[in-house]
Structures are given as C-alpha cells and as structure tokens.
Image (cartoon, helix red, strand yellow):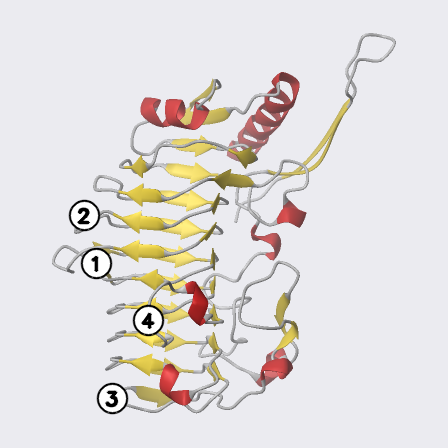
Amino acid sequence: MKKYYLILIALCICSINFIHSQQKVALQSNGSTTIFGGSDPFTAAYNASVNGDTLYLPGGTIPYPAIISKGLVIIGAGHYPDSAIATGKTVLPGNLSISEDADNLWLEGIEFTGNISFTSNHKVDSVVIRRCKFNNINYNGTGATPCLNNNIIENVIIGEAVFTNATSGLFSNNIINGQIAYANFMGISNNILLFNPGSTGNAATVTFNNVDNCFISNNIIFRSNAGWVCYGADLNTFANNIFTVVPSTGTNTWVNNYYSVVLTSIFISQTGNVFDYAHNYHLQSPSTYEGTDSAEVGIYDGLFPCKEGAVPQNPHIQIKNIAPATDANGDLPIQIQVGAQNK
C-alpha cells in the first residue's frame, strides 16, 4: 500500500509542478500529505515539519533552509542527468549546515553546489547521506562530542571528507576526488578514491590524512607516489584494496591488497583523477579483484552496491510527456511512466 501511495505523491508533484510552472514540495506527516508552493516551498514545508516526517523535493534548483536541525527524511529526484531527464535533477545551491537535534536525518537524491557541514561540536547521530553529490563534507569540532553512527554512502564527493568530530560511522561506496581526513574508528569500504590535489582546498597531499583505528577495505585507491597514500595514519587495517602503488606499511596492518595495479586496467572507461558522469566505473575484470566478502572490490558491491544512475528510493518518474495545450475535446494529453522502487 505504501508503494502505491508514494507513486500517487510522485504523480501529483510532477503534474502540479508542470501545470502551474511552480515548484512544489510534498510533506508527508502522520499519514497525511500537504503540498507546499510559493517562492520557497522547501522552507515552508520544513517549518511545518516535525521529527520523523518526510519531504519530497522536485527537480530543478530550489531555495532551502540553510540549517537543518530536525530529524527528517528529505528525498530529491536525483543528480545523474541521464536518470533525471523527466523531472530534472534536484539542485540545492550553496552550503548546507546540519545542527544539533537533527538525529536520524536522511538526505537522498540531491545535488548540493556547495559543502555539507556539521556545526562545530554539535552531536548529531544516525545521519544518512545517500546518493547525493556535494563538494566537501566536514564534521567540525574538537572530537569532544562526536557524531555517532553516521553513514555516508553511494555519494559523489567533489572535494574532501573530514571527520574531526565524528566516529563509529561508515563511509561506503562513494566516489571521492579528495582526501579522507581525521577519521577514527570508522568503516571505509568499497569506495573509489580518485584524489585530485586541486580539489581539497588546502596543502594536504595524502589520501588518508590522520586516519586512525579504521577498517579500510575493498577500495580502489589512485596515487602515483607511495608516500602520498597515508600521513599520520595509525592502527588501521587495510584489506583487499586496489593500490596503484606499493604504500609504506607504517603502524598499519595490510591484508590481501592488490599493489601496483595499472590504472587503465581497472575500469571499463575512466581517465584522470576527477569524477565524470560519462565514465564507466565497472571493473574490466571483476573476478580478478576479490574483496573481503568474496565479491568484487569497488562501488558496485559490498554492503551498499551502487545503484545505476544513483536513482533515489522514491518512485522514479521515467517518462513525462505533457501536451502544451488541450486537444479538440478540451482534454490535456498526459503520459507519465513511473517505476516503483524499494531500495
């Protein structure tokens, strides 16, 4: 029943947005749905929401509250251009700040043109950021009140991920251009770490910068210099990762890794050190590079195998054809095809 209810919401948002040429946001709360319009529908829906509510965002660029301090589920239309042809991708311009009282926040299917940051020393637990695209993610603070059990999964990260005030989380199945810094007691698995030095915005030149006590497995790690893989990284276990160099061992444990792998032999279609929608990040030889779970390394396996096109879990509008005017009978021809989803 819930699946069909979500499909109805998707159809309503699509039709209202098109017919009225105005963006609408749906707020699902306590079994009822309210549609918000106007010049800033996201903020209006956010102000009316309470912890546990769900907000569905339309495609297009939309204004939004700069600070999120509620435990909401916020789902957009996705960020891959070829998967959001019917609706347009959901774009939130600028930076987003996540503040205390946002425990259990879930963000999915959204492109942020700026950074995602957690307010300094604010403890925000059980946050999920999934299938989004953004520049940097920063957990600001001293580590005295760390954010616990945050899951950063299936995202495209143009810059870096800094976990100064977070621990006991999961960073999985992401594609990241920049460094991972100050992670402690985290799982870092099935990512592609392209590392583009120009994307970090600071002088750091290593992939794992002051990363300690982490289990780092099934990743694909680009580096041309062995000394640039780790700096101040101790007591980690590196297992079944692909390296393009032979990193120095340091005080870490190294198990069943693949060393000195030629870049051009890894992916079906990929060049350089920057994410590109046109690239194909599937492995040329999946059976050659087995992970800790006996499946392939990289983003298409592990706990959260990447979904093609990073399509969010809400019903996906695949085709939308709405005539610009009524026909001779006064009817408006509309064709909408929606695919139900549960992942």
Mark 4 vs mark 2, foreground winner is 4
Image location (x, y in percent) of residue 214? 29, 74
Q: Earlier in the sequence, mark 4 or mark 2?
A: 2
Instruction: Bin the neighbour count of mark 3 within 10 Å (Cα to Cα): few under 14, some 14-19, many 20 and up.
Output: few
Give the image location of residue 137, x and y in percent.
35, 55
Identify the residue position indicated by label 4 in the image. 203
Q: CA–CA distance between discs 1 and 2?
A: 8 Å
The amino acid at mark 3 is Thr
Around disc 4, counting alpha carbons within 10 Å, would you say few (fewer than 14), some (14 to 19), or many (20 or more)? Answer: few
Answer with mark 3 or mark 4, whichever residue precedes in sequence: 4
Q: Which residue is mark 2?
A: 122
Nearest to the observer: residue 190 or residue 261: 261
Q: Residue 165: which numbered mark, if any?
A: 1
Determine whether 230 is above or below 32 in the image.
Answer: below
Picture disc at residue 277: none
- Amino acid, disc 2: His
Distance between mark 1 and mark 3 Cα atoms: 23 Å
Left or right: 265, with 101 as reference point: right
Question: Residue 224 location in percent, x, y?
Answer: 48, 85
Q: Are marks 1 and 2 in contact (CB under 8 Å)?
A: yes
Separation of residues labelled 1 and 4 (CA atoms): 21 Å
Q: Secondary structure at mark 3?
A: loop
- The Cα atoms of the two marked residues, 3 and 4, are separated by 24 Å
Residue 127 in sight from this viewpoint? no
Q: Which mark is residue 251?
A: 3
| Kind of residue at disc 4 | Ala
Q: Nearer the viewer, mark 3 or mark 4?
A: 4
Q: Residue at x 35, y 32 (%)?
A: 65
